[in-house]
Each structure stands twice: as C-alpha cells, then as structure tokens.
Image: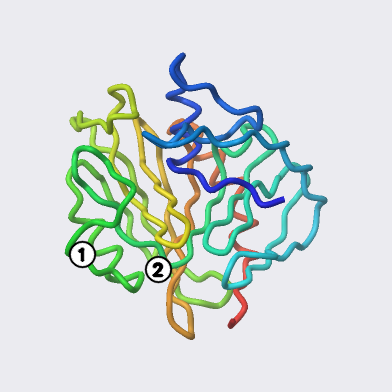
Amino acid sequence: MLPEVPSVNRGLAIALAVATFAVAACGGSSLPPPGGATPGAAATPAPLPAGQHTSTAFQPTVTFTTAVGWVLYTDSASYLNLGPVVGGDVVGVHLFANPVPLAQSTDCPTAAEPGVTATSSTTFLAWMKTIKGLNVTSTSLASIGGLPATAVDVSIKSDWTASCPFAGGTPTVPLIFGPANGLRWVIAGDERLRLYFVDLPKGGFVVLDIDAFVGTEMDSLLSNAAPIIKSMTFASN
C-alpha cells in the first residue's frame, strides 16, 4: 500500500477535526488540504512483528528494530512514519528526507519559505532557531547508525497565539515542507518534538522527529522510541 502523504501533520489533523472536516477511517488521516480534495480512507496497516525491518521506499534505505506494538503507517521516498498501536500515527517516529523550511506567512501555505536555503542539517537547524514562537532547546550531539547527529527539543512558546487558518485558533508554527511530496508539517498547541538532524555521508540529510502531539506524553514516548532510534542504520545509497 502507498499511504497518502499528509498535508498537515496527522496529530494536528486529529486534534482539530470538527464538523467541517470528517476524519478518514484510518484513524490518523490528515484534514483535507485547504481548497483540495478529501484524501481517500485507507485500512490501518497490520502491526509489525518484533524484530528488524527495512524500508522499501524511503531513501536512504533505513533499517530499524521494533518490539511488539508498532505499526509502519507510511513508507514513501521522502517520508516514513512509525507509530505505536495505542495512539496510532497521531504520535510516534517520523523521518523526513531532505526537507526544506516551511513558509512562515500567516496564511500557512504548502510551500517553501521564500529566500531561505537550508541544504544541510546545520543550515536547517540554524533557520529553525530564528522562527518566532518556537522554543528550540537542549541542543546536544548524538549518534544514529554511526552517523553524527544533533538533537534538539522543540515546542511552542507559551505566549504564542498565531494560528494557521485550518487550526481553529490553536497556536501553530509552520516547520517542515517536503517539496518532493507536498508534505506540510506544523507544530500545534502543547505538542512536543525531539528532533535529530543527521547528515548523510554522500550528501543530503534526514530529520528524525519523535513527536508527542499531547506534550505530557513525551517522556513515555521517548522511552518507548529510544530502542528504535538506537537500532537505526542508514544505507549509503
């Protein structure tokens, strides 16, 4: 199955579902993109068996090990989503290949931020630290699959009130755009992210997001996701 590419992060879609927008049957589908067609519903994939798994579409190919209770919701060339069975794809682990900064204008378009070039993890992170309304803290060095990585914790500032038109007044900050697939990733409300920025040996980079849409669930999610992150290796393709 080729799962749909979300137009906004699925956690935001679930939390902001109102009568105007019907949530598709797969339990984590995104809201219809503003002005666009409603994505088709798809069956929830079966949970992965415990053990080692390798992406079939995501590039670079990533191998990881899961315990019982995780689902591979999306495996596409530039976006991969692992989520726990309990909580679904609302929370979990998200990988973005070569994302670019998402436009910061108040209408929150599905487009890159004009005039910003971020072609490495270093330049993307430097741009992210300039975003109004965003806390970017606890920068540290890490290693994923033998590759150096930089880890940061991300949340919305408590006094931030700006909201994307589709968010129903919930404070939001646009963050990641996937030009290859039209993916738009927006942080909302008390959502918390642990981001790992990984530069690849042959060029390009991956952003790995451990994402708790309900911020108070972050500590538990980090604990459950840590073995998966530790097991990850990236092919040199």
Label 2 element class:
strand
Pick whichever of labels 2 and 1 is earlier in the sequence: 1
Amino acid, disc 1: Val
Q: Which residue is mark 1?
A: 116
Seen from the viewer's position, the closer of residues 194 and 26 is 26
- Compared across the picture, whether 58 is left or right of 115 comes to right
**In which quarter of the view is residue 198 placed?**
bottom left
Judge the density around disc 1: few (<14), some (14-19), many (≥20) Cα neighbours within 10 Å: some
Q: Which residue is mark 2?
A: 141
Judge the density around disc 2: few (<14), some (14-19), many (≥20) Cα neighbours within 10 Å: few
Kindly report which numbered mark, 2 or 1, lies closer to the viewer in this rendering. 1
- Compared across the picture, whether 71 is left or right of 89 comes to right
Residue at 77%, 43% (x, y): give it. Answer: 47
Q: Position of residue 7 (x, y in %)?
A: 44, 43
Residue at 40%, 46% (x, y): give it. Answer: 185
Amino acid, disc 2: Leu
Residue at 63%, 43% (x, y): give it. Answer: 83
Q: Position of residue 52 (x, y in %)?
A: 77, 63
Q: Position of residue 208 (x, y in %)?
A: 48, 58
Q: Position of residue 134 (x, y in %)?
A: 24, 44
**In which quarter of the view is residue 162 placed?**
top left
